[in-house]
Image (cartoon, helix red, strand yellow):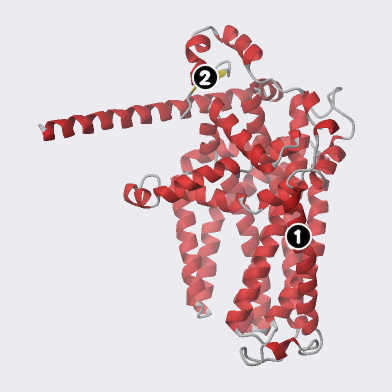
Amino acid sequence: MIFVGVFPNSGWYCPSGVLSSLCAESPEGFAENVRRNGRMIDDGDTFSPKVRRWRDVFWLAIFMLHLIALGFVLVLLGLNRFKKSDRLNIDRYTNRVWEHNNGLTENYWPNYAVAGGVGAALGWIWLLLLGSHANLMMKVSVHILTTYLAVISVLCFWCKQFFWGVAFATGAALQFLYVISVVDRLPFTMLVLQKAVKMVWSLPEVMRVAYAFMAVMLLWMGIWSFGAAGVVASSRGDLGRWWLLVVLSVSLFWTGAVLCNTVHVIVSGLVFLVLIHGGRNASPMPPNPLMKSLRYAVTTSFGSICYGSLFTAAIRTLRGFRSKIGNNECLFCCVDFLFQLVETLVRFFNKYAYVQIAVYGKGFNRAARDAWELFQSTGVEALVAYDCSGAVLLMGTVLGGLITGTCAGVWTWMTWSDRVIMVGSTAMLMGMVLVGLAMVVVESAVTSIYICYAEDPLLIQKWDPQFFNQMSGKLHQRLQHRSALAREILTQNQHDTRMQDIFHL
């Protein structure tokens, strides 16, 4: 563990390895040493064409082949039940295994159209209200999600869907326990999110990027839902339909994550440039920064985005679960090996990599490793671990998905009640992807702020001095907490060793 010395009033900090030589000096002398020895950002290194090379090309090829192959399969599955049952005679390969019915693609495709429309509307509304009511909307997401999960659980029990009723009830309980466990972190989290919204709202082109990518996602969802409707209407049994829908959902999740992280890279690059130059309208800003960021994101860095999108969400979920069981000593010991592996994976798969990809054009693994080592070497990792902004934004995404799934599920229940869960669950995923494309613009600003603070604190001080002092004060507090905890553990270990020596004597 690397601890950092902090001067709360000045905001300057230094790694523990140089505390004896630097932190004993006055804040002014310390600041001078940071300027001389620290890593100062040179904007000439950012968005430089000569250092941009194609990265992770293998994963770019895999993603594109996956899209082409899946698009063909989706069209095939949809057409097989479009206006005519078994139009392409696919059922003859399964007539000895699966049940038969006369469902048609057009029976369920409109339900998915509703899901796409509701998800897009929620995303667009969120972006429109971002400047004036973002803080209120985030608070609502945190506190309403538990209630909404509980209500859906009751509806599932009422429809005799006991498995899903238990699943949603468990989700409501876990959400409630999570909010209770992090309630003391929410004020700082909301502060960070407010500043991120302030940054994003000052960049109207960021909103246009989000709208454009939501439109692209809607086009792909039109094809995806056509195939999914064909699967729901197919003659396969419930088990066969569910397996196909799971495969299609994994593909949609990956595609949605790729588009979200592409927006992440574009917005991160633009926010980083704004922080480097001290403002959107600063004279040294390079021309057309948005187009440069967009060009790199969809060309040389796209392979890295495809690669990282496969793993980052799962790793973040596992890491978040680890933080919840940290106080349960028995459970922690049982799964310690697994989560040691998770911590290793976090070093190579984390969302902060996308800032490094955007700014320096690195490959994903190197970008993730460099970002994590930067946080650990400066102590900012303590602040990142304390912040819950990612979880708060995820709650908003899940809430949007639940609303979308509910709308599609209610319509399905009125016409095809035996397909409610199939249509509702896949519609929920569609809503989460669309709302996530709106949420990611704020998350991109958050990650860029933390990377800038770790790389060169002066950038944040120049942008917002009050926020800079608040971040430095919170960092100082978290490092003091970790130091006290480390001393407590050391004292306990020494006491246990003495007791063992006495016992042996």
Quarter of the picture holding the C terminus: top left
Up/down of 394 relative to 448, above or below: below
**Which residue is at the front of the view, 367 or 420?**
367
Residue furthest to the front: 58
Up/down of 502 relative to 136, above or below: above
> Counting other residues with Cα less than 10 Å from the Cα at mark 2, is it few (<14), some (14-19), or many (20 or more)?
many
Which residue is at 46% across, 63% downward? 170
Up/down of 80 relative to 210, above or below: below
Residue 430 x/y as whole percent: 69, 64
Q: Is residue 190 rendered to the left or right of residue 476?
A: right
Q: Is residue 134 rendered to the left or right of residue 178?
A: right
Identify the element where label 2 is drawn: strand
Q: Nearer the viewer, mark 2 or mark 1?
A: 2
What amino acid type is highlighted by mark number 1? Ala
Residue furthest to the left: 505
How many marks the image carries: the answer is 2
The answer to whether mark 2 and mark 1 are in CB contact below 8 A is no
Q: Earlier in the sequence, mark 2 or mark 1?
A: 2
- Give the quarter of the image for residue 451: top right
Residue furthest to the right: 287
> Counting other residues with Cα less than 10 Å from the Cα at mark 1, is it few (<14), some (14-19), or many (20 or more)?
many
Tell me the tag on residue 120.
1
Residue 283 x/y as whole percent: 87, 22
Q: Is residue 6 rendered to the left or right of residue 403?
A: left
Identify the element where label 1 is drawn: helix
**Which residue is at the front of the view, 69 or 150?**
69
Residue 329 x/y as whole percent: 33, 47
> Disc 2 designates what residue?
6
Say if residue 114 shows up in the picture: yes
Which residue is at 52% across, 43% downward? 344
What amino acid type is highlighted by mark number 2? Val
Mark pair 2, 1: CA separation: 44 Å
